Image (tube, rainbow, N blue to C red):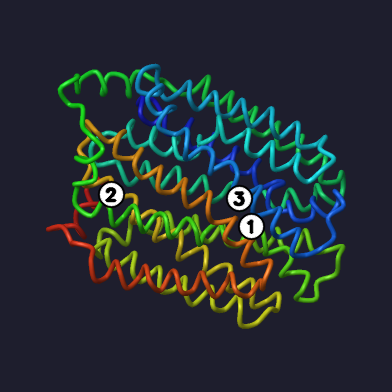
Amino acid sequence: MSEPWRRNLFSVTAASFIGFAGFTLVMPFLPLYFRELGVTDVGAISLWSGLSLGATPAVTAIVAPFWGRLADRYGRKIMVERSLVSFVVVMSAMAFVTRPWHVFALRALQGLFAGYGMLALTMAADSAPPGRLATAIGSVQTAQRLGPAVGPVIGGVLAGIVGLRRAFLVSAGFYACGLLLVAVGYRERVLTSRQAAGGEGQRVTFRSVLAFENLVLLMGVLFGLQVVDRSLGPILPLYVAEAGVGPARVAFTSGLLFSLAALSGAVGNQACAWLLRRTPARAIIGAASALGAVAAAGYAALPHVSTLALASVLFGLSLGTAMTAAYTAAGSVIPEEVRGTGFGVLTSATLVGLALSPMISGLLGAVSIRAVFLADAVALAVIAVVVWRLMAVRSGEAQQPAAEEL
């Protein structure tokens, strides 16, 4: 870990793991928390959950350009620290709410300062030397998958021992640890020197970034994958209850399913680099999306715990592989001197997906929980067809990532 970029990557990756674990300690169980707050109607619970989960990324998507300009001027590290501090404060406040709208309001407030997850991905990519882009992307995405694999299990246990309210305080502690890691371990000088080398003449416009090969298509792909990936949050605990799981075990069982999806997604993040050495990104994204469509249909077809577990594994594996392939393909066409701008554009697309996904899922879930899974299956099938037909394959693309092993 003596190389500056490795130290930076470790700090950002570890902070991402801790932060995402802290988030999933409590957020997957938000429907159950609304029930504790006195909401009894299943449709109302689904709606409040969807709106609350979508509030933060919705607001963040609006203010992201402002924070991006500040990051270019003052550095990305302080922007991540600012975001993590907001999570500590808001998660602590969540433990003391008394009304459903309190949760929604706090989540909306958090959106003014959030977005560290995508910014961490950009920081890792910007710090990576030539030929290490996929390594950096895969490492941070793996952490962002493994964190949610651990978080729901811990959260399910905590919910049964100390209750959901106190679990929010534990979540705040997780974010405090992530803040310390970034503050102590991350060194801005690698990124700053790279930006300084570019000079003012290297500044690009939004339109010129969109002109990079496949970038607009990949923005759409990442948006769609993000919508599908986050669609389970508002409805899976309710679906588990409908599958016949007893009330005392709903939190643990749903947490286990979330963890299976997250863990298999991390496997997909890591496997993608190996696949990219042998297969074009277009084929990987298309095949993974098609597999994800099958998994989503499996959720809807057989609401049994064993079937849900298998579907969760396939669902996470396919989405993890497709997302890493999409980010790496996009990163490979963005020049190094404007990579921050390019990843900022991709971040906007994913934030919109983050914002809309729980809202759409909540609205569909208010009508029928199975409708959410069927919509996911259709969306993934469309992504597979569109990518296969429209995405251009770069010359030597399948062999390019092999340089990462040199």
- In the image, is residue 195 above or below residue 369? above
Tell me the CA gap for discs 2 and 1. 27 Å
Q: Position of residue 143 (x, y in %)?
A: 51, 45
Q: Amino acid at mark 3?
A: Pro
Left/right placement of residue 393 relative to residue 3 reads: left
Q: Nearer the viewer, mark 2 or mark 3?
A: 2
Q: Nearer the viewer, residue 294 or 64?
A: 64
Whichever of callouts 3 and 1 sits on the residue coming sooner in the sequence is 3
Label 1: few (<14), some (14–19) or many (≥20) C-alpha neighbours in 10 Å = many
Residue underneath mark 3: 148
Q: CA distance from mark 2 to mark 3?
A: 25 Å
Q: In the picture shown, does residue 243 fall above or below 285? A: below
Q: Position of residue 141 (x, y in %)?
A: 46, 47
Residue type, mark 1 in image: Gly
Q: Nearer the viewer, residue 138 or 43?
A: 43
Q: Residue at x 52, y 59 (%)?
A: 229
Please give the name of the residue rendered at 34% of the width and 41% of the height, measured from the top-left corner: 345
Question: Image point 45% across, 42% down: which residue?
Answer: 140
The amino acid type of the residue labelled 2 equals: Ala
- Residue at label 1? 233
Q: Secondary structure at mark 1?
A: loop
Which residue is drawn at the image coordinates 58% and 29% (left, top)? Answer: 84
Mark identifier at residue 309: none
199 sits left or right of 387 in the view? left
Residue linked to disc 2: 330
Q: Residue 274 or 103: which is nearer the viewer?
A: 103
Secondary structure under tag 2 reads helix
